[in-house]
Amino acid sequence: MKILIVSDFFVPHYNGGGERRYFEIARRLVERGHEVDVISMGIHGVGDYEEISGIRVHHLGPRIRKPPIRGPLEFIRFMAAVFRWVMTQDYDIIDAQTYAPLPPSFLASRIRGTPMVATIHDVSSAHGDQWLQSSGTAGLLERVLMRLPYDGVITVSRSTASALTDVHGRPPADIHIIPNGVDLELIDSVTPATGNYIIFVGRLAPHKHVDHIIEVFSKLVTDFPDLRLEIVGDGVERSRLKAMVDDFGVGESVTFHHNLSYREVISMIGGARVLVLPSTREGFGMVLAEAGACGVPAVAYRSGGVVEVIDDGENGFLVEPCDKEALHDRIKLLISDDELRDRMGSEGRKKVEEKFLWDNIVEGIERTYRFIIARKNR
């Protein structure tokens, strides 16, 4: 197959969950004999074309200095560039992820008659948390994008699949649930960092509620004065969160990291005592699977696809959304109990080995692509 993947960004220039997913899938598809092109936004200081693990990556439209931060004009320029590209190229199937890649990919695929699948990680309006600061704009745009008649939809969890059906009326038969995964060989090759710390990894966006971690951490350091908080990621909340750290007087115990390589992120996860994900909107939570692969237990809000990765009391703890007291207590319990932490870490590793390996997941992607192509051509 000749496959086109459309994503705002791609590794190594941005290591978000969706970007990492596409990379892991694409390189394995190349190894299985397929041709894979990726089109993504331009990156300042990076050429228009590069080859990564056999994947042909084309950077189109605007030049972004600090992924994932970009403005409305940059979205528009990228969508126009995607439309022009798809209209002039031949592919067996197009796989575009939310949000900006979807409209131009859909329109051009319909004009050219190319099968197209939409990869939808989560549905913000189903949970009240929006992916944009303007909830009205986000809700309207999402209602349009989730209802377009794609040839198929791939999503990462039963939770998102249910939201697509219940909230947006998509037929269940058109939805293919294919979870995220991890590369155990890569993870096992990384030396864990050292130190006494808990960690958050993800976008610094409102629905991730990193402010809840900071508030909880300010109380934890009373009992554990040597404990540190490592915050890995970037986003619109960065300045506010840094100010919050200073307001709580824990600036010397909190470090913000961004622009880390994937191996550096894995190293930091592997050395943590606990990974914390207090997100109230999460399609899957790839970082939870990565923590499990590292043998690190997690504490997370009970939301979306998180419940399909964390079994409460087995490989981590689930806390009701926005219950900061319970979040504090569960983190404290894991920090205090080495035996419990080790047991949960081992259970996390076992679950990853059973359910979340990319080498198995890519087979499902390949079957789905072939099914959609065959159905389109009937």
Image: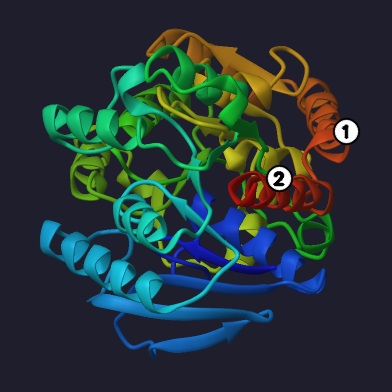
Rendering coords of residue 54 (x, y %): 68, 81
Left or right: residue 297 versus residue 238 is right
Q: Please tell me which residue lies in front, 198 or 107.
A: 107
Judged from the image, the secondary structure of the residue bearing numbered disc 2 is helix
Rendering coords of residue 316 (x, y %): 69, 22
Q: Label 1 vs label 2: CA separation?
A: 31 Å
Quadrant into which the N terminus falls:
bottom right
At horizontal 76% and vertical 48% (from top left) the residue drawn is 367
Relative vertical location of residue 83 with respect to residue 184 in this rendering, above or below: below
Q: Is residue 300 visible?
A: no
Rendering coords of residue 328 (x, y %): 48, 17
At horizontal 30% and vertical 67% (from top left) the residue drawn is 83
Judged from the image, the secondary structure of the residue bearing numbered disc 1 is helix
Left or right: residue 280 versus residue 226 is left
Return the residue at label 1: 350
Return the residue at label 2: 371
Relative vertical location of residue 63 with respect to residue 230 in this rendering, above or below: below
